[in-house]
Amino acid sequence: MSKLFVGNFDFEHQLRGGEAFTLPVHLRRRNVELSFLWTALAQDGDFILGDAGVDAEFFRISQRQGLPRLNLIAPGEAIPAALELCPWGWSNEMRQWGAQHRCTVNAPEENAVWRSNSRRFSFACERDWDVALPDAAEFVDLNTLRQHLRDVCRPETRWVIKAEFGMSARERILGQGAFVSANDVNWLQRRLARGQRLYFEPWVEKIVEAGLQFSIPPTGEPQFAGCTELLTDARGQYRGSRWSDHLQAEWDTEITCGIRVAGEVQRMGYFGPLGIDAMRYRDDSGEVRSRPIQDVNARWTMGRLALECQRFVPEGSCFSLLHLAASDEPLTMPVKDCLRFLPDYLTWGAGSRERLKQQVYLSWAETEAELTANEKLLAGNNILAGE
């Protein structure tokens, strides 16, 4: 059965409840662009739902590069019946949409998805298993949170407060010391008013992060799929993933903890893809420590799509999937061993043809030194995470 891939990349907003949320235009367009990354997971004949059209030549070029033959369902086009629905993440809205369009919907219950993706769950695992960051805490009221800031923060202490549901370094505020601005207080109060909890974490010196990927069946043992190094910028936003054959051994302890998380998620009734972000950091004394459950995502993740790209590279190669700002110049491929996943242009409903603001490249090499050199050539004037 062919699949229909739907890029509801902000589905956590549907889980959080409260007032309706409308994505800003720039994020809606970003999500349309990212929909072409489903190519990493798709097979010949699968479908991608798009909110914009694309030049036919793009798919012909993709097939010549060895990527699968896909069908784009553009705005206004009918959706074929009996396709298996594959969204970024499951929500009631997505289940209803699938039923309305006669798709095959094989989804876990809403409560299992909500609980698995909530920071309430991941924080409980960190706390109960004694792997939380120092002074990290959960709050259900503003006064207690502000008192915690006064108790644990020196003037130079940097911190982050996260909402119960968030993604891509959104739904959070950053601060320093015990002071919270009026705008931040309003942000906190709105989320508490929805019944969400808030989560304080000290801002630590990150050394390296990894995305641990699992597949959870409805019955049977959860399976570890693999891991990639996460590339993020100074604000913690995702910029890409790297894979090499030694990563699994380097993250063995965190993977063991992740398998335990996967078992808990399965017992709550969730099945499907699961991604867990883990981090190594340096504490105030200079000692390297591990945070094995930084984030739990019961959905597809960019790290998982990057991992699936291994099928496109020669056996034994290391590789990276890089998210870069698109160049204003005509596309040239500065390295030979490279594929691109996004088109150069999209055509919107009014007929306007616009150049994409981002591009995603898959690059590979025999050695990590060669891969790093390729990444720098591809990045051009962009600053790669970790540099």
Image (cartoon, helix red, strand yellow):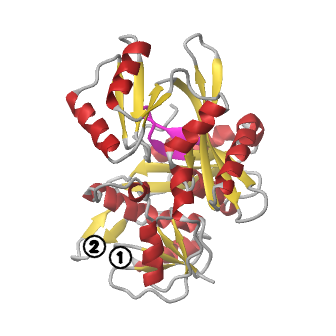
Q: Is residue 335 visible?
A: no
Query: Which label's residue is closer to the chain start, 1 or 2?
Result: 1
Q: Residue at x 38, y 55 (%)?
A: 13
Which amino acid type is marked by label 2? Trp
Q: Quadrant of residue 140?
A: top left
Which one is nearer the viewer's eye here, 364 or 133? 133
Classify mark 2: residues with Cα within 10 Å, few (<14), some (14-19) or many (20+).
Answer: some
Mark 2: secondary structure: loop
**Whether label 1 touches label 2, CB < 8 Å:** yes
- 141 relative to 285, above or below: below
In the image, residue 58 lies at what x, y percent?
A: 45, 73
Q: Residue at x 67, y 40 (%)?
A: 368
In the image, residue 170 lies at what x, y percent?
A: 38, 44
**Residue 86: numbered disc:** none
Q: Quadrant of residue 30?
A: bottom left
In the image, residue 41 lies at what x, y percent?
A: 60, 66
Instruction: Work out how far the residue at label 1 is from the one at label 2, CA to CA, in angstroms.
Output: 6 Å
Which one is nearer the viewer's eye here, 339 or 107? 107
Q: Residue at x 73, y 46 (%)?
A: 259
The image shows a total of numbered marks equal to: 2
Q: Which residue is mark 1?
A: 53
In the image, residue 327 lies at what x, y percent?
A: 36, 52
Which amino acid type is marked by label 1? Gly
Mark 1: secondary structure: loop
Q: Which residue is mark 2?
A: 348
- In the image, the segment drawn in magenta is 230-240
Magenta-span inclusion, residue 231: yes
